Amino acid sequence: MNSYGSFPGARPRRLRTTPAMRRMVAETRLHPADLILPAFVREGVTEPVPIQAMPGVVQHSRDTLRKAAVEAVSAGVSGIMLFGVPEDAKKDAAGTAGTDPDGILQVAIRDVKAEVGDDLIIMSDLCLDEFTDHGHCGVLDADGRVDNDATLERYAEMAQVQADAGVHVVGPSGMMDGQVGVIRDALDTIGKEDVSILAYTVKYSSAFYGPFREAVGSSLTGDRKTYQQDPANVRESMRELALDLEEGADMVMVKPAGPYLDVLAKVAESVDVPVAAYQISGEYAMVEAAAEKGWIDRDKAIFESLTGIRRAGAQMILTYWATEVAQKLARGL
């Protein structure tokens, strides 16, 4: 009996038959220009210092940071996000090293700008946590709580010294209410209207930040739950988004990336400005640790995770694998 009618007419598998076919019909593509490299520079070191919790990532010396910037440019990476790690003796309650024109972050900005000019978008973390002796993202009041409005005054100063150092984009990451508007006013006041703001619009209080604490030599005790977002909330993220856009954010970010792809997709569908996502230290460390154990294929896991972030709507991805991935993409891997 003729049984042709029992076979499916629609066969989606036809478009999965070969690597060339799968590549042709791929809906989401990674490109080196999608990637931004977060980089740490440590004051007072002449050699890079390995970060134990993030295999392959280091606290750079000024010289090795310049080399990393050149390597990123050569690979086609779009940007570098700089984090300064001051000497412990320079930390204080107000994070004054963060607004010192000769502080390590401002020095690093000038170094990278002198090395690569405008060939790489130079971004800077605009937050006090690396520079305070208590490790919080702002100054504290008499009761030991982060004082939102006093912190905004410090952020305004920080934005101005980073802009004077030559940064292209500032990244306020402290989750203080009103931070974008205050920073925009501070930049415009000194004639730095062209410096963009990448707002850390959605930043959750996450367990996945653990390795980052080592990376920046954090002095934090306790947590940041009174100013970073509750992982249970989504509507709150949309409120934060509306406020940041109203205050003048040029780009917005979701952080972390992997555990919050639903939030990233919701943000991406709601805005007409570029959307970034930060694949954070814990996401990086999990893949590296599992790969070291032989439990997963490292390269495939890296590319799959980044594709997922891109598919959810991120136009830019901050990832510690940025240069490595960009090099592999250029080779067609």
Image (cartoon, rainbow, N blue to C red):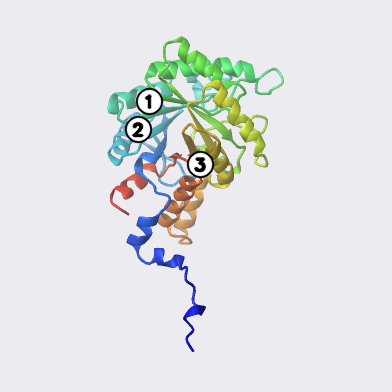
Does residue 102 appear in the picture of this structure?
no
The structure residue drawn at horizontal position 30% and vertical position 36%, both measured from the top left corner, is: 73
> Residue 113's x, y, as percent?
32, 24
When asked about the image quadrant of residue 243, the answer is top right
> Residue 196's x, y, as percent?
44, 23
Residue picked out by circle 3: 280
For the residues marked 3 and 1, what is the alpha-carbon distance in whole angstroms? 21 Å
The structure residue drawn at horizontal position 27% and vertical position 38%, both measured from the top left corner, is: 74
Residue picked out by circle 1: 108
- Residue 65 image label: 2
- Labels 2 and 3 touching (C-beta < 8 A): no
User: Quick one: which residue is furthest to the bottom in this view?
Assistant: 1
For the residues marked 2 and 3, what is the alpha-carbon distance in whole angstroms? 20 Å
Q: Secondary structure at mark 2?
A: helix
Left or right of 157? Residue 144 is right
- Labels 1 and 2 touching (C-beta < 8 A): yes
Nearer-N-terminus badge (1/2): 2
- Residue 285 image label: none
Question: Type of residue at label 1?
Answer: Ala
Does residue 139 appear in the picture of this structure?
yes
Q: Quadrant of the C terminus?
A: bottom left
The structure residue drawn at horizontal position 49% and vertical position 73%, both measured from the top left corner, is: 8
Question: Type of residue at label 2?
Answer: Leu
